[in-house]
Image (cartoon, rainbow, N blue to C red):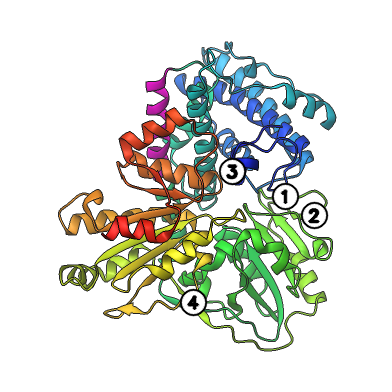
Amino acid sequence: MFCNQCEQTVKGIACTSMGVCGKTEPVASIEDVLTYAVQGLCMVASEGRKVGVVDNAVDRFICEAIFSCLTNVDFDPARFQVLTNKAVELREAMKAKVAAAGGVTEFASAAATFTPAESLVELEEQGAALNFIPSMDGNEDLRSLKQVILYGLRGLAAYADHAAILGQEDDEVYAFINQTMSDLTTEMDLNNLVGLTLKCGEVNLRAMELLDAGNTGTYGHPVPTTVPLGHRPNKAILVTGHDLKDLAMLLEQTQGKGIDIYTHGEMLPCHGYPELKKYDHFYGHYGTAWQNQQKEMDVFPGAVLFTTNCIQKPKDSYTDNVFTTGLVGWPDVAHIDNNKDFTPVIERALALPGFTDTTDQGSVMVGFARNTVLGVADKVIDAVKSKAIRHFFLVGGCDGAKPGRNYYTELVEKIPSDCMVLTLACGKFRFFDKQLGDIGGIPRLLDVGQCNDAYSAIQIAVALAGAFECGVNDLPLSMILSWYEQKAVVILLTLLSLGIKDIRLGPSLPAFITPNVLNVLVENFDLKPVAATPEEDLKTILG
């Protein structure tokens, strides 16, 4: 096992025996087998496009399989075995179609003919023997860039999958994923790899645009909404993850059953969507970010539904209350299949005590996505011109358990009162309930949404730049980001592809980026790590 794809890798190098996320060595090895099998499928799918053979079901499967390998999504080796076998089955079926259309079906890489072992133990052995991202001629910088691209693709596939679930697809996104997964099996020079890295970010912008269209087109544009952090007497279900459609279906199925629905983690912004907030039993938010779930879910008196990523090993004390759906999974945890019949979740919630008292723990505001913020753009612009607003800080990204993340709490607390703070993703749980006041009636802390809503933040920045007739890099705007997994990686690539500079990244830099690759990013984009203290960064930014 050698896994360095997330921010919490052991000693800043890699997890080699047990992942900090809970990933075991067998799961890590079988994930590598799946990735390799998918590369073989992508070779054939890319060749198919050249001769007019395109299969949407294959493209959807490729995204699902790649997404499954993203940190904190699926920890069940049996499910990875099913995906691996299906990848090979689809590859061979696609080969027949491509051959019939006159396309090439023989490839240099052994991934195109790879046969997975029949048992999980043998699959693990195959994975342990794989070296599908070798250093080319001993050049670790080229290997590093290939890893950046692979991890970027995992984030891109996640966003493409989220969007497709809501009916938003673009064949160019699928074509890029297929071709790039294929390219990773070949030798490429530094310039080609750098170009492909930025192209991954560019394509991800399109995927996030599709996801934004799916979310807002289906559930309406988020509106400012007050969300209680306490609870009231009733049976309860806690929904975590990212998937709005799963939440919508659960809300529909629980109407009139005496169950309140609470959000956890990145589901908090869902309270701002008109077509979700219309349900009276969609009550409040419980808990904070993903890494605290074992403590928080242990005392939650209802059922828990995991959608998409960010699962940790459930404690024995509440395993029977946990359900997964979609791509997320944990061995021996009940899974709701694609028919989305949440009856088992509902029945479990009714059997549990639920909340028996009323607790007021304050509230937070959500719903400050692009439509809301741009709706008051004239006030924002006037406030900047009058110097009522001195600077904007985008403080967002992933949260995590690794020490050093208190930096973000202290930063927001110390940002001067004439500055605005925009935030998104679960990193906001370090400071989401801070009372920062307002500037001219506009709250100083604006929750843009999930990590999935990075498109909204980009559109806000682009619109402000247009209003001030300058580039985004010329705005009084600083981006101070935290990262953990591969969605954050591809969002960073998107920002770099847009030419955005002077981004601060923390709490530590990726272990898969070599010093030479980091130097390229520093020289071209002025990318830098967060300082040792927030005061240092504030002094540099504000003078």
Element on which disc 4 rests: strand
Hey, which residue is sitting farthest bottom in the picture?
Answer: 358
Q: Which kind of residue does numbered mark 1 sit on? A: Gly
Q: Which of marks 1 and 4 is in front?
A: 4
Q: Badge 4 is on which residue?
A: 364
- Residue beneath label 1, please? 329
Using the image as rendered, state which of residue 57 and residue 215 is in the foreground: 215
The label nearer to you, 3 versus 2, is 3
Which quadrant is the C terminus positioned in?
Answer: bottom left
Task: Mark 3 or mark 2: name the one nearer the start of the chain.
Answer: 3
Residue at image point 42% right, 67% down:
412
Residue of label 2: 333
In 3D space, how far apart are the residues under numbered discs 1 and 4 (Cα atoms)?
Answer: 30 Å
Q: In the image, which is nearer the foreground, mark 1 or mark 3?
A: 3
Quadrant of the frame with the N terminus:
top right
Residue stretch in magenta: 189-205
